[in-house]
Amino acid sequence: MAGAHTAPARARRQAKWPRRALPTISQEVLAEMVGTTRSRVNFFMNKFSSLGCIDSNSGGVKVHHALLVVVLHNTPTPDR
């Protein structure tokens, strides 16, 4: 009976953050998209990786939830 709760718990964890298939782009293309150089993209990718915000390897980049929260919810307020 000890393993009875294992499968539902695993299913909840897996369903918590659905994965999306995103197109593969190079650092050069990303740099063009955001208006900078490939070397700056590489610099910040390494910086985010060393800070633990992303995991990157030859298979792609995994952005950690904490970074998404900061980026998506930290909107600048307009000067009044």
Image (cartoon, helix red, strand yellow):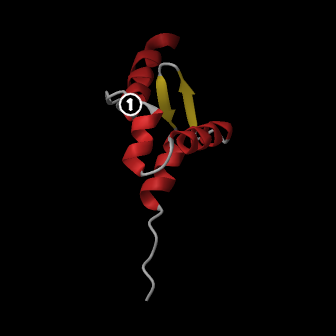
Q: Residue at x 63, y 37 (%)?
A: 46
Q: Residue at x 52, y 19 (%)?
A: 58
Q: Regarding mark 1 in the picture, which secondary structure is present there?
A: loop
Residue 6 rendering spot, x and y as whole percentages: 47, 17
* Residue 34 versus residue 19 in the image, above or below: below
* Residue 46 versus residue 9 in the image, above or below: below
Residue 42 rendering spot, x and y as whole percentages: 57, 37
Evaluate whether residue 22 shows in this view: yes
Q: Residue at x 42, y 51 (%)?
A: 35
Q: Quadrant of residue 21?
A: top left
Q: Quadrant of residue 45?
A: top right
Q: Residue at x 39, y 28 (%)?
A: 12
**Who is closer to the viewer here, 10 or 22?**
22
Query: Label 1 crowding class (10 Å Cα cut-off): few <14, some 14-19, many 20+?
Result: few
Residue 59 rendering spot, x and y as whole percentages: 47, 19
Residue 7 rendering spot, x and y as whole percentages: 41, 16
Q: Amino acid at mark 1?
A: Ile
**Who is closer to the viewer here, 21 or 27?**
27
From the image, tell me which residue sits under label 1.
Answer: 25
